[in-house]
Image: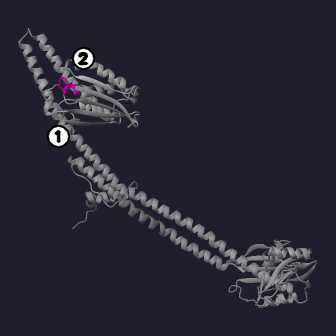
């Protein structure tokens, strides 16, 4: 059995599957790419923030440990004795303002440096008075300075050397290193360090001398890691250098970089997968609509409808709009079919008459003038039907140019009523106009508004018996103008009211009267053209009332 790869991919189902996935314009690909980029950028931003924060925390912690160690060593160097378990050393900046003020008032030449606090005893202030190292106690009760005690410098350097010798000699296991240099930068003492390290530290101090600066932070490379330095010039001019190995911090940051490198590769795949799933879910509803549209296009069956799915509210709204569009198309096609049948029915009679008259004209010469007149009348009726149908179509579609102006509806009604006054008098029908004293202006098409009023008035006069009455009322309601035309004619049945605005529809009672069934359809089209509404109330034997609401300001459709 041979395997034909080409035949498989030419299959309709599989070819559509692979074609959709290979196309970069597909919605699911775009969503997947957007998610992958979003996940990548989010991960990158989070990493940068975390890295900066961790770097700051590590180095700030090391700087604080160095400063605290330097404070302790300086306090022990000045006092000449080690700190006890119940003593705590801190910087002068943390002393309260009240103690500072009292100390300055009593000893204006005193230069404070450090503070030694005892748990249940007085606080000691270390500093210099003149060129001597002194210590001033602060009484616990009233927080006032006591008598100055001059500190002896005998054996202090040896004390510091002994403190250094007790430090752990393994440089990598113990993060701290300490050096004590003279004012001429010669080594006095240090923690156990290799000669190479001592030489590097001395060279660094020679290149970047401390001078009068109290704190100097720098770093020097040592093989694969570096040391953070804290330099402090002591009161007697000697220099204390405290160093902290940064290899642990750098190792932690390197591990963070490795984790990020792995995450930056994995996260876009995760984001792309999530985006693919979401895009596929969204496009599933769109594909359902597309498939249904193709099915309707190929079969011509407009009765099928799509059902809501689980793709989301927006897709369901699209399905609702699609179903409404299909339903509207179905209605239009049904109306078109009905209209075509009615047009054929209504045009067949005048055409038959026209043909009969023409045949008769060919046989009887003396009556040619009258026959020609009949032919012209029938042709006029046919043209009227055609023109009215075209006007309805233009009004419904809005395809014709809108000629808008300020129109006084009261003036339009009076002119149309005056035009039909002769016909009303001949039929012995009373026409009454109820209108306000002030004009009622609307923004609209004057010619079409005249056709609207004329058709309603003509319809009322046509179906009102002799001795009846037609009332035309105009009034303002909110932001609209209400036009009501009421007659006392024969009325319209409830079943026929639903169809009176349909094209070519004529009730059974109106078949014997002249007309083509397009007048009320034109009224509705003109009303909707002006964004208005038309309604009708009728009762058999008592009359009919048409109400047209027209907004004063027409908004473009």
Q: Is residue 461 magenta?
A: yes
Q: Residue at left 33%, top 55%? A: 316
Q: CA distance from mark 1 to mark 2?
A: 34 Å
Query: In the shown orientation, is residue 425 left or right of residue 53?
Result: left
- Measured as percent of width and height from the top left, residue 154 is found at 91, 89
The disc placed on residue 422 is 2
* Local SS, label 2: helix
The range drawn in magenta is: 460-468
Q: Is residue 304 above or below residue 458?
A: below
- Quarter of the figure with the C terminus: top left
Secondary structure category for the residue under label 1: helix
Circle nearer the viewer, 1 or 2: 2
Mark 1 = which residue? 495
Report the side of 220 relative to 513 (left or right).
Answer: right
Give the label on residue 25, or none: none
Identify whether 57 is placed above or below 123.
Answer: above
Q: Which class describes the residues within 10 Å of circle 2: few (<14), some (14-19), or many (20+)?
A: few
Where residue 440 sits: x, y (%)? Answer: 39, 28
In the rendered image, the quadrant that contains the N terminus is bottom left
For image coordinates 84% across by 89% down, the residue present is: 81
Q: Quadrant of residue 50?
A: bottom right
- Residue at 8% across / 9% down in the picture? 365
> x, y percentage for residue 110?
90, 76
Q: Is residue 126 left or right of residue 85?
A: right
Label tally: 2
Q: Which of these two is toward me, 490 or 157?
A: 490
Q: Residue 556's spot in the image, x, y percent?
A: 40, 36
């Amino acid at each position: 059995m041979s395997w034909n790869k080409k035949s498989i991919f030419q299959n309709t189902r599989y070819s559509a599957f692979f074609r959709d996935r290979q196309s970069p314009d597909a919605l699911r690909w775009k969503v997947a790419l957007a998610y992958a980029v979003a996940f990548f950028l989010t991960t990158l931003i989070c990493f940068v923030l975390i890295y900066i924060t961790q770097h700051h925390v590590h180095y700030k912690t090391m700087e604080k440990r160095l400063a605290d160690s330097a404070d302790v060593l300086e306090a022990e160097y000045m006092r000449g004795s080690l700190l006890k378990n119940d003593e705590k050393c801190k910087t002068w900046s943390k002393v309260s303002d009240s103690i500072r003020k009292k100390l300055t008032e009593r000893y204006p030449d005193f230069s404070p440096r450090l503070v030694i606090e005892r748990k249940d005893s007085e606080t000691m202030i270390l500093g210099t008075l003149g060129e001597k190292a002194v210590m001033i106690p602060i009484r616990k009760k009233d927080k006032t300075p006591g008598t100055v005690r001059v500190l002896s410098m005998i054996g202090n350097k040896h004390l510091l050397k002994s403190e250094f010798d007790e430090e752990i000699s393994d440089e990598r296991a113990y993060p701290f290193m300490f050096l004590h240099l003279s004012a001429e930068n010669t080594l006095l003492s240090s923690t156990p360090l290799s000669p190479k390290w001592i030489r590097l530290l001395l060279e660094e101090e020679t290149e970047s001398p401390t001078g009068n600066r109290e704190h100097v932070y720098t770093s020097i490379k040592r093989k694969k890691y570096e040391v953070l330095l804290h330099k402090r010039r002591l009161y007697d001019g000697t220099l204390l250098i405290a160093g902290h190995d940064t290899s642990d911090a750098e190792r932690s940051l390197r591990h963070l970089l490795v984790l990020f490198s792995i995450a930056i590769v994995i996260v876009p795949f995760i984001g792309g997968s999530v985006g693919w799933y979401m895009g596929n879910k969204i496009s599933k509803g769109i594909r359902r609509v597309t498939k249904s549209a193709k099915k309707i296009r190929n079969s011509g069956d407009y009765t099928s409808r799509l059902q809501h799915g689980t793709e989301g509210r927006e897709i369901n709204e699209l399905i609702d709009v699609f179903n409404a569009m299909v339903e509207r198309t179905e209605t239009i096609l049904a109306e078109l079919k009905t209209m075509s049948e009615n047009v054929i029915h209504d045009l067949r009679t005048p055409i038959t008459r026209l043909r009969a008259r023409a045949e008769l004209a060919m046989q009887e010469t003396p009556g040619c003038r009258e026959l020609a007149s009949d032919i012209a009348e029938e042709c006029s009726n046919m043209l009227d039907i055609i023109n009215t149908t075209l006007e309805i179509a233009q009004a419904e579609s809005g395809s014709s140019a809108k000629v808008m102006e300020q129109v006084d509806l009261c003036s339009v009604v009076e002119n149309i009523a005056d035009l039909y006054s002769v016909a009303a008098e001949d039929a012995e029908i009373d026409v009454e106009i109820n209108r306000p004293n002030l004009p009622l202006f609307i923004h609209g098409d004057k010619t079409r508004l005249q056709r609207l009023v004329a058709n309603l008035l003509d319809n009322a006069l046509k179906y009102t018996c002799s001795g009846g009455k037609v009332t035309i009322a105009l009034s303002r309601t909110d932001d609209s103008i209400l036009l009501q035309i009421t007659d006392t004619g024969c009325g319209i049945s409830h079943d026929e009211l639903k169809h009176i605005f349909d094209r070519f529809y004529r009730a059974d009672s109106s078949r014997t009267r002249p007309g083509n069934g397009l007048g009320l359809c034109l009224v509705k089209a003109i009303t909707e053209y002006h964004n208005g509404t038309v309604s009708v109330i009728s009762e058999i034997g008592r009359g009919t009332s048409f109400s047209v609401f027209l907004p004063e300001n027409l908004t473009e459709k």
